Image (cartoon, rainbow, N blue to C red):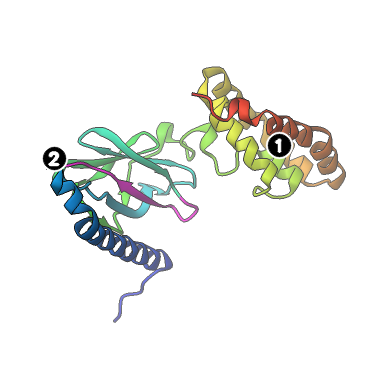
Amino acid sequence: MKEQITESDWRGRRAGRLVGSLGRLLALVLRVGVLPAYAADDEFPPQLPHYFSGTVSTSTGPVPEGTVVEAFLGGVSAANTTVTAQSTYELLVPGEYGDEGKTVSFKVAGVQASQTAAWVSGEANYNFDLTISALPDGSWWPFPFARPSWCLIATAAYGTDTAEEINILRQFRDVVLLASHLGTEFVSLYYEVSPPIAEVISQHDFLRTVVRVGFIDPVVAILNWSHALWSERD
């Protein structure tokens, strides 16, 4: 009986093959075009990153979209990404000469994953599934601001979470609000009070128009106007 291959398996294998092909191409470029220049200076060409991909889950099931996955090389943070809607992840873990064989470990929402691997330049590990016992505090969501749609009221007002106006609200959240304790507290409070409000708004076209035109659009206009002032904060 032939083994059934799921869509996520196909994606993982295609991604692995793509990374492997790119790695071989880059290695060829380094060998043919760059290596002589490095050799002339008694230096070595850069190491290729180690590719990982797979699913992310707890003991009770998959983790939600937006959950943070972080990779550590020799105990030092090296790369991070977020989980997709299909509970999958992809990571390129960079390294240098001397890192060969060092342990790559992972954290999911700050929780240590069970899996580790030895770092190898140019290696591709697809279907490298990560598991943790549970998300922090046993909660389905790792952090209040890690939910798939942060701007719940704006999403209800615009009728979609992909509107351009919502993108700048998300950017303001990430750059300004989550950079301070007070801002993080505000985001957490927003999650507590916004779901029922968003539900009411989504059910009435008149309310959607009033909230969008009278509140969200002016806020977005101010953020766009002042974008240069806050978007490049250190």
Give the mark toward the camera: 1 or 2.
Answer: 2
Which residue is drawn at the image coordinates 62% and 29% (left, top)?
228
Instruction: Determine which quarter of the picture holds residue 55.
Output: bottom left
Which residue, given by chain and number where applicable, does mark 2 sit on? 98
Does residue 167 appear left or right of residue 22 in this picture? right
Does residue 156 appear left or right of residue 169 in this picture? right
Q: Give the residue type that dot 1 points to.
A: Pro
Query: What x and y, as percent, mark residue 54?
Result: 34, 55
Query: What x and y, as percent, mark residue 136?
Result: 41, 33
Q: Count every numbered label the image shows and give the total.
A: 2
Which residue, given by chain and number where applicable, does mark 1 sit on? 196
As drawn, the residue found furthest toward the bottom would be: 1
Does residue 44 appear left or right of residue 19 in this picture? left
Which residue is drawn at the image coordinates 73% and 29% (left, top)?
222
Q: Give the residue type that dot 2 points to.
A: Gly
- Residue 125 position (above or below residue 234): below
Which residue is drawn at the image coordinates 60% and 26% (left, top)?
230
Between 48 and 52, the one lying in front of the other is 48
Instruction: Determine which quarter of the picture holds residue 76.
Output: top left
Residue 201 highlighted magenta (yes or no) = no
Between 94 and 52, the one lying in front of the other is 94
- Residue 214 position (above or below residue 121): above
In magenta, the rendered stretch is 84-98
Does residue 36 appear left or right of residue 6 in this picture? left
As drawn, the residue found furthest toward the right would be: 206
Query: What x and y, as percent, mark residue 183?
Result: 57, 22
Figure quadrant of the N terminus: bottom left
